[in-house]
Amino acid sequence: MSRGASEDDRRKILGELVREVRRFGGLGATYFRALAGRVGLNATDLQVVDILASTGSATAGQIAEMTGLTTGATAQLLGRLEKDGVVRRERDPDDGRRVLVSL
């Protein structure tokens, strides 16, 4: 926006930006759900796969925090993904008390 833009122009442009951001978010969520269905996962499972692909190994607690899931729901999700061979859980080589989840 130029310095000479009026307050009404500014509000109008910001309103358009908010609408486009919402639209983009909605389309992204729709794409993510469709992609998850194509690979035989639900959207939350695919979200965890995406997190691990971009961040590397993580603990179940970290995954719960990043997804907003409870620790119980995260444990069930990871059990399902491990059973399907998507993730594996291994002891942290630097701290044997921790378990890391990786693809």
Image (spheres, rainbow, N blue to C red):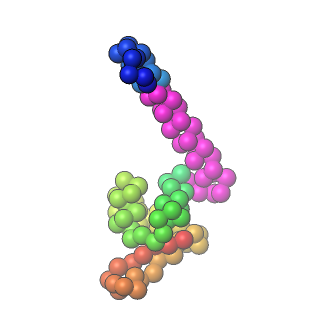
Which residue occupies the extreme right position in the image?
38
The one of 72 and 91 positioned closer to us in this rendering: 91
Rendered view: 52 above or below 17: below
Residue at position x 51%, y 75% from top? 88
- Main SS category, magenta section: helix
Q: Say if the magenta span includes residue 91.
A: no
Residue at position x 65%, y 57% from top? 39
Q: Position of residue 12 (x, y in %)?
A: 43, 17
Rendered view: 96 above or below 16: below
Quadrant position of the C terminus in the picture? bottom right
Residue at position x 38%, y 22% from top? 3
Q: Position of residue 41 (x, y in %)?
A: 59, 57
Q: Quadrant of residue 30?
A: top right
The one of 51 and 72 positioned closer to us in this rendering: 51
Number of numbered discs overlaid on the protein picture: 0
| Horizontal arrangement in the rendering, residue 83 relative to residue 78 (left or right) | right
Q: Position of residue 62 (x, y in %)?
A: 36, 65
Q: Which portion, as a residue range, is magenta? A: 17-42
Q: Say if the magenta span includes residue 38.
A: yes
Q: Position of residue 99 (x, y in %)?
A: 39, 78
Residue 52 in sight from this viewpoint: yes
Which residue occupies the extreme front position in the image?
3
